[in-house]
Amino acid sequence: MPTREDVLKELSKVKGPDLEGDIVSLGLVSDVFISDGRVIFSITVPAERAQELEPLRQAAEKVVSKLPGVEKALVALTSERKGGGQGAAPAPVRPAPKAGDAASVPPPMRAGGAQPGGAAAKPGVPGVKAIIAVASGKGGVGKSTTTCNLALALQANGLKVGVLDADIYGPSIPRLFHVTGRPEPVSGRILKPLEGYGVKVMSMGFLVDEETPMIWRGPMVISAITQMLREVEWGELDVLVVDMPPGTGDAQLTMAQNVPLAGVVIVSTPQDLALIDARKGLNMFRKVDVPLLGIIENMSYFLCPDCGGRHDIFGHGGARAEAERLGVPFLGEVPLDMAIRETSDAGTPVTVSDADGAHARIYRDIAEKVWAEVARNRDGGHRAAPKIVLES
Ligand code: ADP
């Protein structure tokens, strides 16, 4: 296993953003954490140059991955927070609500009840009382992992839950729920969803051939979504959680317009760069009047399995601050933890494999807040949608 010094020595071979100096002597590398074959750190760059500097991130990841004993390097670009969040985003026009202050987990929504966000105008799905989207401004922030654990936590809180995996570019829900096979027709075109850990699951992965070129996938989103919503025997569900495709393109926008959503949960990492993307995500849903249920900060902090210490390598708290500034509920923080990664990748999510553990509790708390927000919106107790103008 390499030491921190070994890692920094390798990183000093990576040139700085303008090919001057190296990233170590320029002071761009964060603390480095080494644990169990993984090396984790971040590199600070100006937010507006994030895309352009992706090769720099990859170069850093590559040199570190090559060190003997390193199984994986996890490198993120972060941008410096300027003076207490005086960024371009405007101040909220109303105080940020406390997401968790509803007295208890509310009862399920009435079938056929009016839904916010113009959802009443879109035909509902018979038997399904609420549809929630989980979205992120970009890929790789843990959206699918969060969708899966949130769905299982909603179930643990006593609700009947289904999951619709609309992430056409990387449908990972079947793996997360450990379900394989093809949904069988029950009558005519109606398919029976598969089931994982008691949750009914449908995925783009079941409908779109893996060989389908990416370029054809976008246009298929809407027809596949419509099919998965309306031609699947969902039965009676309190809530259907939709894992949205990452990003804020046309496919996502059309989907947000077509699905009768009770609200959307945004998943973001704490880094400012991810938050810029998260803001775009928020903006997209606001454009089509879908209520924002709140923001979850994923990979919020790192709990070191060796020293037991908590490390804020990725700039923990960015999403909370952003949520407050935007007047959107902050739903909770999920740590960066190898147990979450490993259980997700193995198809045994922490919410079931360690149902009484600390991580499961975090997801259940988040689920409770999400459901409280859904109920608050449904009951009309919800604040008028804030008129905030977000950069796009
Ligand atoms: P997305 O759906 O946003 O593309 P995924 O949910 O597929 O992201 O997650 C990307 C990777 O990060 C996966 O390998 C997943 O196991 C891992 N991951 C997600 N959340 C966490 C977390 N809180 N701690 C550790 N690893 C995580």
Image: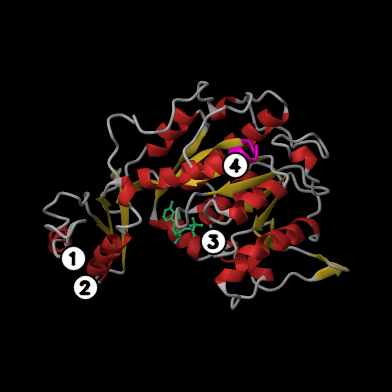
How much space separates mark 3 and mark 4, taking CA atoms? Answer: 31 Å
- Tag 1–tag 4 contact (CB < 8 Å): no
How much space separates mark 1 and mark 4, taking CA atoms? Answer: 45 Å
Circle 2 sits on which residue? 68
Q: Is residue 362 above or below residue 346?
A: above
Judge by depth and name the residue closer to the eye, 361 or 211: 211
Front tag of 3 and 2: 2
- Tag 1–tag 3 contact (CB < 8 Å): no
Circle 1 sits on which residue? 2
Q: Secondary structure at mark 2?
A: loop
- Tag 3–tag 2 contact (CB < 8 Å): no
- Tag 4–tag 2 contact (CB < 8 Å): no
Dot 4, crowdedness within 10 Å: few (<14), some or many (≥20)?
A: many
Please state the extent of the stretch shown in magenta in the rendering.
285-291
Q: Is residue 92 above or below residue 186?
A: above
Disc 4 Cβ-to-ligand 1 distance below 8 Å: no
Please report whichever mark, 4 or 2, sits nearer to the chain's N-terminal start. Answer: 2
Residue furthest to the bottom in view is 211
Q: Secondary structure at mark 3?
A: loop
Residue 217 image position (x, y, % from top left): 61, 67
Q: Secondary structure at mark 1?
A: loop
Q: Secondary structure at mark 4?
A: helix
Q: Residue at x 47, y 53 (%)?
A: 138
Circle 4 sits on which residue? 285
How much space separates mark 2 and mark 1, taking CA atoms? Answer: 7 Å
Disc 1 Cβ-to-ligand 1 distance below 8 Å: no
How much space separates mark 1 and mark 3, taking CA atoms? Answer: 30 Å
Q: Quadrant of residue 180?
A: bottom right
Q: Indicate the amino acid at tag 3.
A: Thr
Dot 2, crowdedness within 10 Å: few (<14), some or many (≥20)?
A: few
Judge by depth and name the residue closer to the eye, 236 or 296: 296
Please report whichever mark, 3 or 2, sits nearer to the chain's N-terminal start. Answer: 2
